[in-house]
Amino acid sequence: MEKIILTGDRPTGKLHLGHYVGSLKNRVELQNSGEYDKIYVMIADAQAITDNIDNLEKIRQNVIEVALDYLSCGIDPKKTIIFLQSQIPELCELTFYYMDLVTVSRLQRNPTVKNEIKLRNFEKSLPVGFFTYPISQAADITAFNANCVPVGEDQLPMLEQAREIVRSFNTKFDEVLVEPQALLPKNQACARLPGLDGKNKMSKSLGNCIYLSDSPEEIKKKVMSMYTDENHIKIEDPGRVKNNVVFTYLDVFCKDEHFVKYLPEYKNLDKLKAHYKKGGLGDVKIKRFLNDILQEELRPIREKRLKLQDNIEEVYKILSKGSKKAKIVAEETLKRVKEAMKINYFDDEELIERQKERFSK
Ligand code: TRP
């Protein structure tokens, strides 16, 4: 069986370091592994509208920001189809039919949607489109026959919903749809990179992010402001490594080579941690070290982004080409869905023949 990946992001903000270690880096690895026959990465602008109908300008701007982030991280349009959800009307048509396979109470039980409704204060005025987005997400996945969906844990209920729709459709009609599997991030530390404050996941609304498009100065300022250990006041004080944002990031980004290059008095991260715990190692030193590492990691991404920013028309062209390719595949799936449901009236010669007979009697 072909191995097909589909994944995507809502374009509600620029992508940050949390997206990078939690998903983008992994997507680039999957793309370059040569193990997949087709890879689709979708900018889910239509889904973003479901809770942003009064902020369309925000979505419009972030479509291009997310495209720039994808391309500068190494998602390669020669290997991966990058497309815009709103340009594939077939997804709406599939959603419309899938809606008849799902009950309201089933949607109400979806823990991710439940949580998101609370976060957005939607309890009293819930847009129908937002409530039903898990169904539209099943359309996104099945339209492209994707069997692998790399997502974070919060998206597992969406995958489960999609699988149920697939099984229900295939049982009622014909084995047309492919059942998808989630592909979770391997590394737990990467899956939940904390924000600069150390209290929460990196999130735009909390203002605790390092963005892929940040300048070297912004990165440095943010690293120097990171939460460490409130009891580590004097350099001699013993320090805590757990829940210390600087060390959490070092766990994710630091390699032994970095010590040779930037901090040769330590051999590896264990040695650095041991000194910090014992006392005598100041926060400024570990922050400078982390800054050096992050600058090294983000420099090539930023440089690529700056080049692409000089060529925005080209970026729109990439999205347009990708959307055309994606549309062809979605059209094919929709055709098979309608055939299976026998609502392809004009192509169904047997149906026309039968009706002819019925009325001639
Ligand atoms: N819900 C995803 C997010 O919040 C975006 C998305 C839309 C998606 N459709 C998808 C992800 C299909 C994976 C598969 O970012």
Image (cartoon, rainbow, N blue to C red):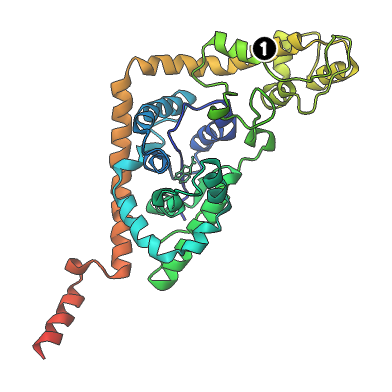
On the image, the x and y values in percent for residue 295 come to 59, 13
* Residue extending farthest bottom: 361
Whether residue 181 can be seen here: no
Task: Identify the secondary structure beneath mark 1.
Answer: helix
Residue 240 placement, left or right of 326: right
Tell me how many marks there are.
1
Report the quarter where the C terminus lies: bottom left
- Kindly identify which residue carries mark 1: 224
* Residue nearer the viewer, 342 or 63: 63
Residue 95 placement, left or right of 189: left
On the image, the x and y values in percent for residue 65 come to 41, 25
What amino acid is labelled 1 in the image?
Answer: Met
342 is higher (above) or lower (below) than 98: below
Residue at point 55% right, 31% down? 19
Whether residue 29 can be seen here: yes
Q: Image quarter for residue 217?
A: top right
On the image, the x and y values in percent for residue 124 come to 48, 49
Q: Is mark 1 within 8 Å of ligand 1?
A: no
Residue at point 73% right, 11% down? 260
Q: Image quarter for residue 247?
A: top right
* Residue extending farthest front: 124
Residue at point 16% right, 81% down? 355
On the image, the x and y values in percent for residue 84 come to 35, 38
Residue 45 placement, left or right of 17: left
66 is higher (above) or lower (below) than 149: above
Mark 1 crowdedness (10 Å alpha carbons): few <14, some 14-19, many ≥20: some
Residue 255 placement, left or right of 143: right
